[in-house]
Amino acid sequence: MEENSVRKNQAEDKLGMHKEFGLSTLSVNNRKTVFLLLVIIVIGGLVSYISMPRESFPEVQIPEIYVGVPYPGNSPEIIQDKIIRPIENEINTVKNVDEIKSTAIQGYASIQIKFDFVISPDEAKDLVDNAVKEARADKEFPQDLPSEPTIQKMDITQFPVVNINLSGNYPVEKLNAKAEILEEEIESIEAISEVNIRGVQQQKLNIEIRRDDAEAKRVSFGDVERAIREGHMNMGAGNLSIDGVDQAVIVGDKFTKVHQFDSLLVKSEEGNSVHLFEVADLYFGDSDTTSYARQNGNPVVMLDVQKRGGENLLDALDAVKEKVTGLTEMKVLPRDIEISFTNDQSIQIRDQVSNLENSIIFGVILVVLVLLFFLGGRNALFVGVAIPLSMFMSFALLNMFGVTLNIMVLFSSVLALGMLVDNGIVVVENIYRWMDDGYSGIEAAKKGVGEVAWPIIASTATTLAAFVPLALWPGIMGEFMQYLPITLMIVLGSSLFVALVINPVLTAVAMKIDAKKPKVKRALVIGFLGIGLGLVFQTLGAISWGNFFLVVGGITIFNLLLLSPGTRVFQGRVLPYLERKYFSFLAKSLKRWRPAWVLLGTFALLIVSFALVTVLPPKILFFPENQPQYINVFIEHPVGTEIAKTNETTKKVKEIVDQVTLDFFSNEIEAGKDTAGQSKFIESIIEQVGEGTSDPMAGPQFGTTPHKGRITIAFAEFKDRNGRKTSEYKKTLDAAIQRAPFSADVKLVADKNQDGPPQEPPVNIEITGRPGLPYIDLLHKAESVKKHLERYPVDGVAKLKLNVETGKAELPITVDKEKANAAGVSTYQIAQSIRTALFGKDIAMFKKGDKNYDVALRFGKDFRGDIDALLDQKIMFMNNRGKKLSIPIRSVVKSPKKHITYGSVKRKDLKDMITISSSVVEGANPTEVVENMKVELNRFLNSEAGEEFSANGFAAKFTGQMEQQAKEMSFLSTALLIAVFLILLIIVTQFNSFSAPSIILLSVLLSLTGVFLGLVIFRQDFVIIMTMIGIISLAGIVVNNAIVLIDYTNLLRKQRKDQLGLSETEQLSVDEVKQTIIKGGQTRLRPVLLTAITTILGLLPLATGLNIDFVSWFTTNDPKIFVGGDNVIFFGPMSWTIIYGLTFATFLTLVVVPVTYYLLFRLKRWIFKLGGWTMRSGM
């Protein structure tokens, strides 16, 4: 029999029927080169994997630029007209600008410009820089700016990656001194961009002018500033050669004692000298309070540490902690100073990366077990080697391209696990078939690969085609998500390379046909010896070595006693049984009218699934709802609120947080189950007031923020929460905040940390008016809309807020231009004099010990709160004739009147705009909330007030997350159509027919039945981003088995025609075709099941959230098993989509595809017969 097979193949060889694949033949002929390449791949992959920077989500460079322009003393309206509009008009002429937003506040303009992602952030910055220069060149643009505009790129990584808190039985000054040492040392780390100290006031040399004395002696701020700059200085005067040696001449003497400033000569006129002590009080002490910081209610000195963009966060924080440890060991930091790390971003990243790595390991184990059962140990070994080799090659390529090891890359590796063995299965099995026919390993490798090379290339191409559109995803979402398709394409491309180059060489050298009987005695000795050595090493404390030997021994005995017998039973009994049952079922399905009923029934099931989704709709989310690692409670008073008042409010909010925490644990504590639950669940509660309290996702914040506070609640890692949900905690906190007894002008918002790209609020309504309308009118209309929505509250809305601060007390001082021009004094001189009196001005540096401190000049405290004192202060200036004059400010300004106004003017795309926004409470469906909000907004627009609103040129529309959601949904729908078109293009080219591709695409459409039924039955969320990516991925996976099945059925039809000696124009009978369809399905049953099961099992650990820490298990005997986590929340929807769809698609491939093939054959046969045309063999 074997000789006949060999003769047959040799005869076919002579006829050229068995072609070889050039690349595979080249690799088999150069085996040593391939083995060297194998070593390079393994080493390169390992080195790359170890060295790749770890991070949670990809670090994206966003082409978004911020412009900040100071113009002190001017109202928001003036800032808008004189600063913002000219710059906006210039920027609007720049190419690739996507959006322009601007904010005008008292004395400051900020403009945010978003560009399309077709240009880099550096290019965007250059374009904005040029536009600002063009705007400033206009003669109408203010020429008296106190400093150059700030132009900077947006960097979403510029937020604290860890807080270092110092506390202990030391005065604040001592803690601050140590914090400054720590600040300097940490900033010396290359990966750290900036360190800011919070919770302590910076010390200064304060010079406070006594107004009456200064006026009596005709001394101005300018006189004092000039005197200090000229008297407190050192200047190099050149070199002097003495005895042939050049010596630098230094003139002057900087003061080192506070009292030295007292005698400084400020002014000398007409023989009258005035010294500084005669007009001012000097003292060294704290500046005005700018921030407070507390940890768990106790004051701390806090350091906010920011990472430099592009640096490895884990390495950066390791270096920070090593630096702190080193300073402690060197006793630079006393050991009795308590040092704690909070909000440590590296913990979550290590956790997420570790869990995904464990999912990969778990998935590999499951896939290999399936391979062993289906293929046996021999073939499974050669197929299984594709997994690590493909991974190593992929990591080397990704590292070469500068990609970080983030969770998108690791998830893509998990998704590819089950798919990357497909090519290896086909190649190894075909090579084995040739060796079984009597060919040598080398010849079998060449011919075996030659038969299947182009089919597996085409099959891989169809899978990759599904992901190509995703790699072209535009915008910030695409910048984050593109790593998924890129990684998948690299991994699957690597698996194809391994199948065509590495697998042929390994099988040619190592594959044997003769199955040797297992040596039971030898295996038992090795197994029990390994277990014995493992127990000995465990007893001696060498846990890793002990587990190594235990694993070796355990696997050996497991393989001998269970796996090998189980594999033989599975292959000898279970699979043949399945094949017989499948043969019988398929044969019955192809009888009489049953094929039509099967197809119609499947379509009916699709319609039912659509109906169920409509009747029992799943919760629709834009992005997965995470279990927050952090919750930030943002506290905001009206602009102008003193920091002391904000601090008191923050303390009261902290009491609310404490009460929520107590209530959250009250049931368990009362039951005595967990009296320490709070400490296990919550890692820390950090309070910050003033500086550094703005939302980091809102971009750079200009100016001081004494009216803002923030409380950050950091939770323990997911596996340490004992099953408690941080989302439930936030839900309780949301309810408590809504009941909080604060006045209406205090805004409290609890927000959780975001996973993934930045997102707009779920509820976001933009109010705009026609050009030329006063901004105050727009504000009043926005408030009327907000009041209506609050009068008819929608469930799920957290708290509506305007993006414009209202209720700001303002005292405008308007310069009388005529009087000022007559006197010869400028508006800038007046504004600068008032600003110096109130806020002060840093005019020099003073060195005390080894530290430099600012020298601050301003009015004394008694005069700073007196408007009459401010207006009566005299401004000293030189008029246009060069004469020094002194006039009271009151004489050149109009009488000021206090009024309440808004704090800023907001614009978007060159139009005045106000936003009403809100987050949704935990557990609410954002889509439903927005739909209900639209109903209420329409109710307002249809009311009498709404008709007036519209008639006067005002408009309201929903934007934000809903607008972004519609945009991304549109792209993903288009991407799905493009993916299907690319797949169609490939399979039409492969089959040179439209019939087979129509069957294959039908299976893709029907696979949606599984997705929709799975979502409805198991009540899972439809997450627009992740579920849609899962559906697109499914399209690329489903087609492969259908392609191979139809291709093999066509081959059987052709072979049957050859056997019967039929000509090209003659056709098989219907019964003959039916038998080839049944035989094709029966033959492809194992590969179809194997492909589906490996893909599903590869995803199952991540879909279920079953986490086993294999490294910890191996090194400490603690596997740290838990279910859930951030990864399953984020990637679970996509994983389940593929699992549901692929499970149903397996049924489609094995039943519906053959049935449809049969029906289509009969239909074509009838049509061709009716038309008198000739029908070709294939489909």
Image (spheres, rainbow, N blue to C red):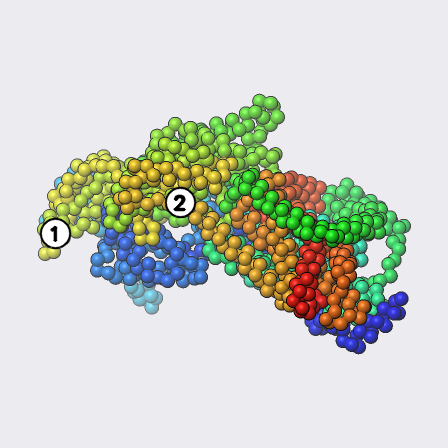
Q: Image check: 814 left or right of 91?
A: left
Image coordinates for residue 660, horizontal then vertical, percent: 49, 29
Total labels drawn? 2
Closer to the camera in the image, 162 or 1163:
1163
Classify residue 435 as left or right of residue 981.
right
Where does the image place residue 549, in percent across and percent down from the top left? 78, 48
Residue 821, label in figure: 1
Residue lying at 72% horizontally and 71% vertically, measured from the top left: 1065
Q: CA distance from mark 1 to mark 2?
A: 49 Å
Tell me the element at label 2: strand
Q: Whole-percent x and y of residue 234?
A: 29, 55
Q: Secondary structure at mark 1?
A: helix
Q: Which mark is residue 958?
A: 2
Q: The residue under label 1 is which amino acid type? A: Asn
The correct choice, above or below, for 832 with respect to 1171 in the image is: above
Label whose residue precedes the other's in the sequence (1 or 2): 1
Q: Is residue 905 visible?
A: no
Q: Amino acid at mark 2?
A: Phe
